[in-house]
Image: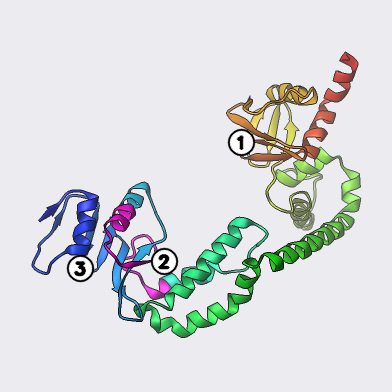
Amino acid sequence: MRLTNNYAVAHEFFYQTDNANYTFGTNCTFNIDKFYSYGTCIGEITEDIYGQRVLLISDNNFSNTTSKHLSALVSANPYYKRYYFHQYIASRGFYTNEIFGIIKNNLQPAKFTLKENREAFIHNFKMLKNMLLIKKFQGYKEEIIQLLKDNVKTYQLITNDIKFKEYKKQELIKQKEKQKKLKEELKTFLNKYTYLNLINFTFSDLYFNDFSLNEYYTQNELKRKLKQYFNPKKDLSFIWVEGEKIKTSQYITVDLKEVTALLKLYLKGKLKLGMKIAYYTILEIKPTYIKVGCHKIPIENINALIDYLGLRQEQEQAA
């Protein structure tokens, strides 16, 4: 029997008979209990610890085509309970050591004040628990149970609203203390240079003086500490002037005249969402930052650039 579309292949995967011979005219195929997208096993019929047949499905989409194959697989599934697990591209089956290794790596400590980190941890913790329900994974039972024990307190913390609220409060206190200590450590340097000079030094290849190799390493360590000071959450981008151009910490260069025109509009309260700088669109205008494309630029940086260009004085004189 020749199967020429995804849904026909998925249907026959579940309803195949022992004496049927199949050929495939599509990029998804199957072989007995394993369903493939190209060369990767994205579905497998196996048994749970109770002897019931279940369907293992790849938690990774890999590509738009594989996403369609996964959709066909789910749609054709008649009644098997589904369990999603991580899968490596080109893996020919759902292998215990591979799945366990990915989950273990994904359960490493993270910044749990970020929602995406919490969601990823919870997803992987639940996946780990589900491994205990699959018969073929029982060879790793002791390791799975131990990893669950190692991470259960974190799971309980980030899934408990009251506990997590207190955790965030304590983390905020720690962060403020850390920034205070860092500011004191950098005080001499912060007082010596202007804000824009510091931004340029911190986020570019600029070094302040000719120096020895030891001084080179010293200034690199200083750059690292300044990055932590200016961008503790690693969510900001920074800009500075180089000649007739504006440089950014994300290695983008735009024309200074374009930026100046928009800064003048900002000072007049006329900067609007949807306006553009080169190819980049203004997406947010907030009291603490302006987001241009993927650049979230702090207002302190914006104001420092305005002062450097003398735009505030220019506006006051014009008034």
- Against 248, residue 306 (above or below) is above
What amino acid is at disc 2? Phe
What amino acid is at disc 1? Gly
Horizontal side of residue 186 vs 115, given as left or right: right
- Against 59, residue 201 (above or below) is above
Please give the label number shown on residue 189. none
Residue 33 sits in quarter: bottom left
Q: Is residue 81 magenta?
A: yes
- The residue wearing badge 3 is 32
Q: Residue at x 67, y 64 (%)?
A: 161
- The residue wearing badge 2 is 85
Query: Are the residues at dot 2 and dot 3 in contact (C-beta closer than 8 Å)?
Result: no
Q: Nearer the viewer, residue 95 or 217?
A: 95
For label 3, the SS is loop
Q: Nearer the viewer, mark 1 or mark 2?
A: 2
For label 2, the SS is strand
Q: Earlier in the sequence, mark 2 or mark 3?
A: 3
- The residue wearing badge 1 is 293
Q: Nearer the viewer, mark 3 or mark 1?
A: 3
Q: Is residue 295 magenta?
A: no
For label 1, the SS is loop
Q: Earlier in the sequence, mark 1 or mark 2?
A: 2
How would you rate the neighbour count of disc 1 (Cα within 10 Å): few for under 14, some for 14-19, many for 20 or more?
Answer: some
Residue 201 sits in quarter: top right
The image shows residue 81 at horizontal and vertical percentages of 34, 68
Specify the quadrant that holds the N terminus: bottom left
Q: Which residues are magenta?
A: 69-98
Horizontal side of residue 145 vs 63, given as left or right: right
